[in-house]
Amino acid sequence: LSNLKHMGSESVKVVVRCRPLNDREKALSCKMVLSMDLQRCQCFIEKPGAVDEPPKQFTFDGTYYIDQETEQMYNEIAYPLVEVRIQRDNFAYGQTGSGKSFTMQGVSEPATQKGVIPRAFEHIFENIQCAENTKFLVRASYLEIYNEEIRDLLGSDTKQRLELKEHPERGVYVRDLSMHTVHSVGECERIIEKGWRNRAVGYTLMNKDSSRSHSIFTIHLENSSGQDHLWAGKLNLVDLAGSERQSKTGATGERLREATKINLSLSALGNVISALVDGRSRYIPYRDSKLTSHPLLFPQGHNPPPPKKRRKRLKRQTWTNPTQFITSTLSMHCIKTL
Amino acid sequence: MAATQQEARSCVRTPERTNMASVNSSEWRAICDKFTNAQNLTEIESRNDKENDPFRSKYKAKELLREIYCSLKNFEAGEGEEEGGGESGDQRPTEQPVDGQREDLFGQGFSGDSPAGLRAARLGAVEYYLGVNHVDTEELSAGQEHLMNCMKLLERCRVSSPNVSLFIQVRNQLGILWAGRDETETAQGFLETAESIYQRYMKEDGSPPTDMTEYFAAEENLLTHQERIKRFELAYTHTMYYLAQVYKNLGQTERAATYCHTTLQRQLQLNQFTPMEWALNAATLSQYYITKGRYMEGRHCLSAATVISDLAGEVPSEAAAQENETESERREHLRQKRAEIARCWIKYCLNLLQDAKKQLEDNIGELDTDRQEELKRARRREEEEEEKGRKSALLFGSEDTFDSIASIEEKVMCLFPLDFTEARSVFLVGQNHVTQAKDYFQMDGYVTDHIEILQDHSALFRSLAFFEEDLERRCKMHKRRVDMLEPICNDLNAQYYLMIRRQLMFELAETYNEMMDLKLALANRQADTQSLDNHTIKKFNHLCSASAKYFQMFLDSLCSPEGKFPERLEEEVLRPALVARFRVARLHSRLISTSPTVQLDNLNKSLENYKYVVQYCEANPEAGAAVETELELSKEMVGLLPLKINRLNARMDSNN
């Protein structure tokens, strides 16, 4: 995540929200090990059983504790993003069961716990209604990334795989991703529900593991004010897959460590060879990895090498494994501004 | 010991003696059927298991295997064979076999096809399959136990054709298991033993070994020699593959690369490969060799990749692709993969030229003719070495492909090009591949890839220019680079392609700078007098301003959306930004003008930028280390320029 902060003239805000203990945890008499200093936007994690060790401290751009409602978080964090007219991304990231959906989709009762997504819809349509002399076009698209494949959750054939393409003017886009015009909050919500249902169908039919898929819901806004220029904006709501690495049965006994685990199939020979190649001025044949080229998750390219002989090898900016940064007790919501 | 003790206890011993020879065929048949069932469950049925019950079939298979184990133990009991007791036949001490033993597994023990040997192998095989089953179902300790039991059983036997496959495969599995526990050296031990067993077996025997599935197969279902060899060799190919991974994890990259190379080689020889996949792997391996400067191996890999990729067949025509979705996908797939191989070739040519340049250049970056002579002499010796090298290097292919691969190798050199003719031949090969790669990776659709290819093409020109003696022609090569990159830079969306645009701006700035220096050098050579003619001055200034313009564009790209230059430069942009400032300063001071006002303006701009460099490095001392030479020169200029400006001011005043 700290890499994201250095994306040239872009900036990232990282906000953390802590959920309360759930029923199962209460039944097991679990203790809260996380505490917050809201003023300073700091989190403290105690090590259970280690009384003399000071708690670990982490600082963020925003902190929200168990008793704070979605409404407050939305007003402080998401509202200004939706307000601004340039492309914005909003990520929700965390372990399965950490409460991402609660924050993003929310519940209808009480009203203060309505999720970020429905709030964003309302916000947008309120603004549209207030604007005078301008025509707005609001469209939605919804895609899923699973197993490095992209699918249209609102398309006629949700099994069809879509391609990621680049255009010099438009940037990165998903070819043939369907766009649906929406005129109201209600329509937005129906569309997102339809997408959700298609996602769920996929899990049962194709034996997918829901905790391993990412989804991106995008609201495209276009505006023409009379004879003036057209502006367009996009709001991306990203639901990232669970950050944990699970064995098939969720067994926590002996975990095979990813790094030194031997790959059994010769089909991975290419990966083994690629891992040996180190150094500049080489080309590694395409590995079919959508996530590594998606504009929201990866910066594009890298800065020019300095001239003359004294060259420092400039590393390609990458999204290193998020689990290295996130501890398992937190539910993280990353809001990135481009 | 828990798992196996449990198994032993659960085996009910029948009172009568059941001699192996008198085991009736129906009982044996039952065992064989169970085994086939277990295999089927493990390999086929298990694929249909739901995500929430993923090991259903494998648990069933495990039960069957346990039953087989019991039955075998019963037969054994019937014959008076107890665990640990037994017939004559040298038994080695049953100590815990750990990290790969190099004992004489070939010398001592039961012969593989003696009754005792067969019994051991059969039981060992069941332990093997139980072991694998446990590992698959995430019960590593139990898995390890069974696999070690298998090892112990085999300990009593001599390596021979009925059991060598088991000897090797159990070690493969133990290698996998220990690697998964991050005990890489232990894994290495088992796998290296497997390797030496294979090598010795092939040297001393080599007959088609029994495949493990045959222990419980009916007479009519035994495999052909051909099939046996195929499976055995595949098992060893996996040993090579696993060792490659282990060496990689141990940081022994060179060894890992050799084992990857061997794996690829075997796949070809044994005809166990998919053409395109193999070709891409070979092309990727070539990149490893290239970054290590091993061009002969790199060229061989790439040539093999080209030949084998052709085996994947013809690209379906556009018409065929439009009618049929499968054909369309196939066309896309083939074209893309071949374009990727082309890109690997481009890197080969580029790296070869760049490394040759490093060998030949003097301390100001020009071709050193003495070095050139020296290297040419040395090369005559090298060519003899090349022949020997080939033989010892791992060659790819089978009878049909050896020649085709060689014919592609002949088209490009693998030794450093030492003069323009040689450099040009390498350049042209690279350029051909650029054309091929660009044909697939078009701008609309593959912006990043397309631009990377153009950057490579530009770099090819740059390297070739080094070898070109004629300054005019050299300049033309740089012009080609500008023509290629300039339009692109301006067409790209500034927000989405920020990083790429920065690279292009920097490269354009440097290229224009290079051209400016060449123009000046040319003019100085031609003219006897000091002064340059107007035309040359105009040309010079144009190139000078263009260079400054792009350096400035680069600097502007670092500004915030409000247009503010950053107070503090991030690590990744520190050196380029300071160098850009330095160059802008220098370029401004070199612009030629007769107007004193213009001269003054240029000198002031120049001073401003030199000052920035000096002041930034004062405020951020660690930055100075990144730009030592530039800082030193900047300090000098900050001292000298004000004097020059004052003199100019004075002259202007006195003229007025």
Image (cartoon, rainbow, N blue to C red):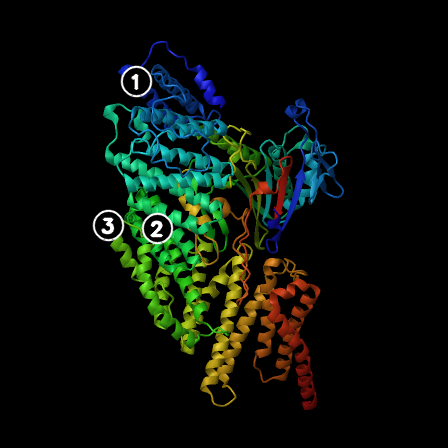
* Residue type pointed to by label 2: Arg
Q: Which numbered tag is attached to residue B257?
A: none
A28 vs A285, left or right, is right
Residue on which disc 1 sits:
B20
Residue A262 seen in render: no
Residue A72 placed where, x, y %?
71, 37
Residue on which disc 3 sits:
B399
The residues tagged by marks 3 and 2 sit, at their Cα atoms, a distance apart of 27 Å
* Marks 3/1 same chain: yes
Q: Residues within 10 Å of mark 1 (few under 14, many from 20)?
A: some
Residue on which disc 2 sits:
B335
Residue at image x 49%, y 86%? B533
Q: First in sequence: mark 3 or mark 2?
A: 2
Q: Quadrant of residue A18?
A: top right
B39 vs A193, left or right, is left
At mark 1, the secondary structure is: helix
* In this rendering, the label closer to the viewer, 3 or 2: 3
A270 or B534, nearer to the observer: A270
Which subunit holds the residue at mark 1? B
Q: First in sequence: mark 2 or mark 1?
A: 1
B305 or A60, nearer to the observer: B305
The residues tagged by marks 2 and 1 sit, at their Cα atoms, a distance apart of 60 Å
At mark 2, the secondary structure is: helix
B387 vs B515, left or right, is left
* Residue type pointed to by label 1: Met
